[in-house]
Image: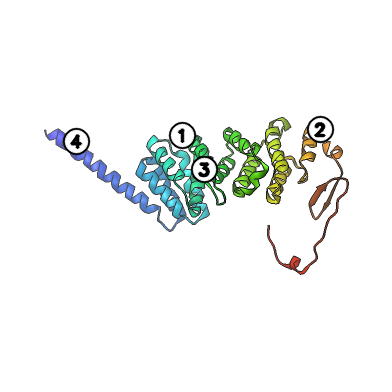
Amino acid sequence: MRSVALACLGLALVVVCAAAQDADNVALLKNKDPDQRVEGAKRLIKAGDKKSVKAVFEALVAERDGYAGREIGRTFSGLTEIEGLDNAHREILGVRKSEEMFAAYWAMAGLAEGGSPTGDSIIKEALEKNHKKDVSLRACALEAIGEAKRVELAQCVLDILNAYKAEDDSGNVFETLAAITAARKLCPTDGKDAQKPYLEALIHILDASQDDRIKYFAALGLSRVTGQPAYLSAAWWRMWLEQGAGGEQKAGKTVAFFDAVAVGTRVIFAIDVSGSMEWPADM
């Protein structure tokens, strides 16, 4: 009986010590030092239980320091316990308010970096949570995939871009721009064959969209991948893709003015010299 009592007492002490340690780690999440907040998140995610993951995500929602938010989010890459992943699923996909979206992005970026099957399933489910106008979970998931350079999830991004239609211009521009940016980050740095699916998806956006913002960022993505000027002509890019190296000389005459590139046989630049042009502006 005595040995049983001692065992029970020992177990009780372990539970009390664990609870005290958890409380200390939760307190670290509120420390003024961002590195201490990150350390607290690391310890709680390592524990991996429901309560710990919930505390870390709530800290992410409240976090206003970009460095700390990014690093706390990265701790989700080490989340392997099913209980913790289930709670991450509940917390991330339960986000509705725009001001909570950074927390969802940071957490999904960590999950994307971790690459676990359950983490990937959370990201894929977030891709289905689109929104008509506000920053959405879909946009956050796309940003996370691109930031973590998760080529294993690239097809999810390409499917969204390739399905784009002209009527989608009236939808959520944030989601489209996030998909364009993700495709650029995921695209291989060399080898046109490997780059082709990504380039074709961006060219499709140039062709399908009439929104100047979307067309601009699609052209900018193509430019950054290929090293070519940011032409806004889908036909030019298709010609370049088909002809290979040197195709830019055959694809049509080009002219540029203040880095605005146009393709065609007749090009006119209209220059606005009205007073409003003196106002400061920053892209």
Q: Is residue 232 above or below residue 64?
A: above
Look at the image and tell me in which quarter the C terminus lies: bottom right
Q: CA distance from mark 2 to mark 3?
A: 39 Å
Tag 4: Cα neighbours inside 10 Å, few (<14), some, or many (≥20)?
few
Q: CA distance from mark 3 to mark 4?
A: 50 Å
Label at residue 72: none
Q: Which residue is mark 3?
A: 129
Secondary element at tag 4: helix
Q: CA distance from mark 4 to mark 2?
A: 77 Å
Amino acid bearing label 4: Ala
Cβ atoms under marks 3 and 4 closer than 8 Å = no
Q: Quadrant of residue 282?
A: bottom right
First in residue order: circle 1 vs circle 3:
1
Q: Position of residue 223 (x, y in %)?
A: 73, 44
Cβ atoms under marks 2 and 3 closer than 8 Å = no
Q: Which residue is mark 4?
A: 7
Q: Position of residue 47 (x, y in %)?
A: 37, 41
Q: CA distance from mark 2 to mark 1?
A: 42 Å
- Residue located farthest toward the left when viewing the structure as drawn: 1
**Is 145 displayed left or right of 61 in the figure?**
right
Q: CA distance from mark 1 to mark 3?
A: 17 Å
Q: Which residue is mark 1?
A: 118
Q: Which residue is mark 2?
A: 243
Observer able to see residue 189: no
